[in-house]
Amino acid sequence: MEERGKLKDESTEGAVQTSQQTAKAETQAAERRQAEELLRAWFVSSPIGMYIVQDGAFRIVNPTFERLLGYSESELVGMDPMMLVSSDDRSMVRENAVKMLKGMRTSPYEFRYVTRSGESKWVMETVSSIQYEGRQAALGYFMDITGLKETEWALRESERRYRLLAENITDVIFCTDMDLRPIYVSPSIERLLGYTVEESMSRTPIEAMTPESLQVAVDALAAEVAKGYRDRDRFRPRVRELEFRRKDGSTVWAEVRVSLIRDEAGQATEVLGVMSDVTKRKKMEQELRKSEASLARAQRVARLGNWDWDIVNDELRFSEEIYRIFGLSTRDRVSGHDTFLESVHPEDREFVRKAFDQALYERKTYSPDYRIVLPDGSERVVHEQVEITYDENGMATRVVGTVQDITEIRDLAKKVIEYEEMNKFKSNLLSTVSHELRTPLATIKGYCTLLLDYDKRLRGGEKREYLESIDKATERLAELVNHLLDMSRLEAGLLKLDRAPTSVAKLVQEAVAEAKMRDQGHEIVLDLQGRLPRLNLDARRIRQVLDNLLDNAVKYSEPGTRVMVQARQVGLELVVSIRDSGMGIPRDSLDRVFDLMYRVEQRLASDTRGAGLGLAICKGLVEAHGGRIWVESEPGKGSTFHFALPLERRKGHREHGQEAPGKKSPRSRG
């Protein structure tokens, strides 16, 4: 019984152990299957190409391998792997395979697979020795690095080109750290500064700079670093023109364009720059500045400025001399042609506008002289010359011009003309005066000789007749001398007036009465309108004016005709008018009637005598009283001479020799 029980216990214990072993084996098998399923799932879904090679042929490949090489699994299984390797890389791949089979450690290596389409693909592969189905095999897995290789080649080519460019470009490319110690400098440094690359790498750029440029560079770099990092300025270069000393001691100017290279935190770590030789340009700029300065001096001396008008944008640019001519500050903005016209004298503005428009739209010559008004109110005379540019459609796009201040030239030309006229006047005066002097002198001399030589033969009546002729000749001579003296005093501004309260009505009445006595061949009529005021004037000088005008009226009109004398008050003036019925004065002579030595040529005047000073003296005497004198005439209808005297002396009135205000006083007949 005991034996039977013992056997039963041992049998039960063995069954339990067997059951445990079976359960363990099943668990291990399940874990293995799970691991194999995970491995297979990873093998199938892995983005890395994977394969197993055994006995020199593919036994298994994953879908990624198939996709990369363009073959199906059925085509790849059983294929010699070397058939897919580029012929140029097979030797290297075999060597790595042998090392792996010998148990030697191999690193990932790169080679090219040839796809079904014939395309080469670069891969990075790793191979390990494994047991597959109880026998030695090779597990390989690789990554497609074709894109990386192409990027590498592009980068290498870019570096090659960059180096080729850097080594052959005339500009200098350099890179330094923030202490300006060189990191790289291109060979062109030798052409620019005379130092080799090796010499340049052992010295900082600041050692080659002139002191002035060094300060500019240091200040600019410090300011740039202090600004801090801003993404929008990341690639914007900073430009400075700096002067460097060459190895031979000469200097060269370079345009330096630098950018700061920054780390991820935005801190500047390096300076990258390009230097361009601008020495020739700097010299040209210096020459240009000298030329511009010389031009400005020439324009200042000649009082000649230039301007440029961009019609399309309505922008007007002046040279400095233009601003001086127009009395403007360079800060004053002249925006367009209309603004410029504001400086033109109001009386000339329309003329300038029309002339310019005709030049602009009708392509006519534009070269006018006109007046301008300066900000201080003074006036100048300028001459302008323009050149207009047109586009292909015939539209004016640009106008350039010059403006010259010809005020002094005009004044000088006027003085030259006056000088020439004065010389002519002197010649005429000498000729006329000598003739006028000889005539009465000859009369005096002749009658004196007769009286002396034939005193006893002459009767009393004849002697008296001769003496009367001598008396008249003496009066004519005295009158001529007085006229010359008066004219010289007026011209010199030395005439003094003996003013006193005077009845102008009485003065005119006396002058008319004596004129009637001197000439009884004309009807002289006096018309005094209203009660005329007394004026503070030089009665003798105004009487001289009246006598001269009355004598002229009689002299230049037919006998028997009427001479009308009128005196009246007009506003704040007393106006005297003397109208004759003569032949009148031609229109082209009205402006010269009051000129010295001028005499109107008329048929009736063929026998008239005189030095041509009378009307010029009248003008001077009237203006010396603050008055004005003028003439109105029409050929064939006679002439009317007017002179006006102020009722009270005007403040700031114009003295003789200056144009009187109000109605213009033409220089006329005498």
Image (cartoon, rainbow, N blue to C red):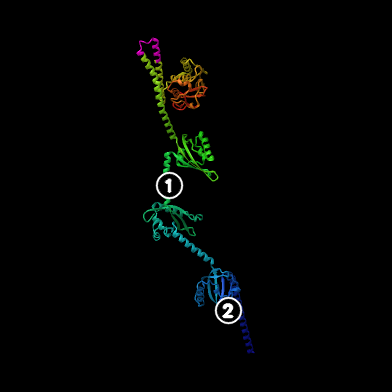
Which numbered disc flags the more N-terminal residue, 1 or 2?
2
Q: Secondary structure at mark 2?
A: loop
Nearer-the-camera pick, 298 or 429: 429
Residue 430 rendering spot, x and y as whole percentages: 39, 24
Residue 288 — which label? 1
Type of the residue with mark 2: Glu
Query: Where 367 sits versus 559, above or below?
Result: below
Question: Is residue 463 magenta-colored?
Answer: yes
Nearer-the-camera pick, 628 or 428: 428
Type of the residue with mark 1: Leu
Query: Where 373 sits versus 170, above or below?
Result: above
Tell me how far mark 1 sits from mark 2, CA to CA.
92 Å
Q: Please state if 63 lies on the left or on the right of 348 as rendered.
A: right
Please state which of the two labelled residues, at mark 1 or mark 2, is closer to the viewer.
Answer: 1
State the predominant SS element of the stretch in magenta.
helix
| The magenta segment | 451-469
Residue 204 — which label? none
Asked if residue 283 shows in the view, the reply is yes
Nearer-the-camera pick, 148 or 634: 634
Residue 133 — which label? 2
Q: Quadrant of residue 11?
A: bottom right
